[in-house]
Image (cartoon, grey):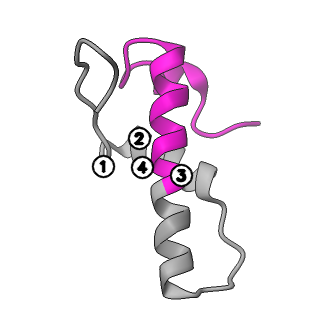
Amino acid sequence: MIYPSIDEMLQNVDSRYSLVILTAKRARQLRENQVAKDDSSAFKEVTSALEDIHSGKVTYKRIKNGIK
């Protein structure tokens, strides 16, 4: 079972496409911060990104050319 569920996640974003892009960008940020710290612990960036989006820690702004 995936938590948080996609149905719950879609309440915070306007489409599945936006959810995928936002998750990928957040996971990339988390990975870059982990490399900068040189931390070798088992860290799931995508899961953490989804949890951040679900909790409202990460938001997005739709612009004409994409998401910022």
Secondary structure under the numbered disc 3 in the rendered image: helix
Horizontally, residue 5 falls left or right of residue 10, namely right
Give me the residue at 46% from left, 12% from top: 15
Q: Is residue 18 magenta?
A: yes
Q: Are marks 2 and 3 in contact (CB under 8 Å)?
A: no
Dot 1: element: loop
Camera-side residue of 25 and 52: 25
Residue where numbered disc 3 is placed = 27
Q: Which residue is mark 4?
A: 52
Residue farthest to the front? Answer: 65
Query: What amino acid type is highlighted by mark number 2?
Result: Ile
Question: Mark 3 or mark 4, which is nearer the start of the sequence?
Answer: 3
Tell whether 31 sits left or right of 40: left
Earlier in the chain: of badge 2 and badge 3, it is 3
Q: Is residue 63 above or below residue 40?
A: above
User: From the image, which quarter does the N terminus lie in?
Assistant: top right
Q: Is residue 6 left or right of residue 36?
A: right
Residue 20 position by quadrant: top right
Q: Magenta part of the protein: which range?
A: 1-28
Mark 4 element type: helix
Q: Which mark is residue 57?
A: 1
**Mark 1 and mark 2 in contact (Cβ < 8 Å)?**
yes
How many angstroms separate mark 3 from mark 1 (CA)? 13 Å
Work out how far the residue at label 4 is from the one at label 1, CA to CA, in angstroms.
5 Å
Q: Is residue 48 left or right of residue 14?
A: right
Query: Pointer 2: what residue?
Result: 53
Q: How many angstroms separate mark 2 from mark 1 (CA)?
A: 6 Å
Q: Amino acid at mark 4?
A: Asp
For the C terminus, the image quarter is top left
Q: CA distance from mark 2 to mark 3?
A: 11 Å
Dot 4 and dot 1 residues touching (CB under 8 Å):
yes
